[in-house]
Image (tube, grey):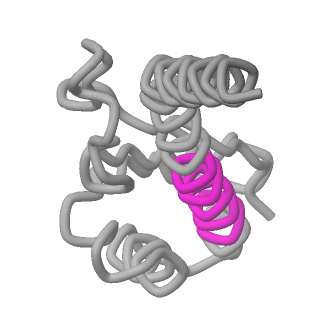
Amino acid sequence: MNRIRARTKTGESAKRGFLSFELVLTLPILGIVLLGLFEFAVLFFARGTLVEASRVAARKASLPGVTVRDVKAEVRRVVSPRLARTARIDVDLGEQAGDVVRVAVNVPMNQAAPDLLWPIGFRLRGRSLHSETRMIKE
């Protein structure tokens, strides 16, 4: 009977060691996937904000009597203060009714989201989020 118990205890400790080894192998992969998912979600939200800002600003730019300064203020009103600090806003106002009005907003990705995937070689530095909207001037 003592021999049977000894064998069972040895088998159980081997299983525990194997399970902890599996955990050591899969936990970093799971962590990277979760960090990537979080970073993508934050970038996706920031991109939606930029799209909304360019659309609202283009609508304002299509109205008569609006200046470039008014359009840029509208973009800064819609986006968060963090994104507004580094946003590059390009505005082309048409001269008369029927002309195309263009509002483009660029923000560096590293300002929109934390750079979480740099350990695996994916960096946000040097990349940007871009949104451009065109409308016809009224």
Quick check: 99 above or below 95? above
Along the viewing direction, whichever of 116 and 30 lies nearer the viewer: 30
- Expressed as whole percent of the image width and height from the top left, the position of residue 22 reads 56, 19
- Location of residue 131 by image quarter: top right
Along the viewing direction, whichever of 6 and 35 lies nearer the viewer: 6
Magenta part, dominant SS: helix
* Magenta stretch: includes residue 92: no
- Expressed as whole percent of the image width and height from the top left, the position of residue 43 reads 53, 48
Q: Residue furthest front?
A: 1
Quarter in which the N terminus is drawn: top right
Q: How many marks?
A: 0
- Expressed as whole percent of the image width and height from the top left, the position of residue 74 reads 50, 80
Q: Residue at x 31, y 41 (%)?
A: 116
Quick check: 134 above or below 6? below
Quick check: 14 above or below 94? above
Quarter in which the C terminus is drawn: bottom right
Q: Residue at x 27, y 42 (%)?
A: 115
Q: Is 51 on the left or on the right of 40, as rendered? A: right
Q: Residue at x 70, y 74 (%)?
A: 63
**Does residue 133 appear anywhere in the picture?**
yes
Q: Residue furthest top?
A: 121
Q: Residue at x 74, y 57 (%)?
A: 137
Quick check: 82 above or below 31? below
- Expressed as whole percent of the image width and height from the top left, the position of residue 16 reads 57, 30
**Does residue 94 appear anywhere in the picture?**
no
Q: Is 46 on the left or on the right of 111, as rendered? A: right
What span is colored magenta in the figure?
Answer: 41-57
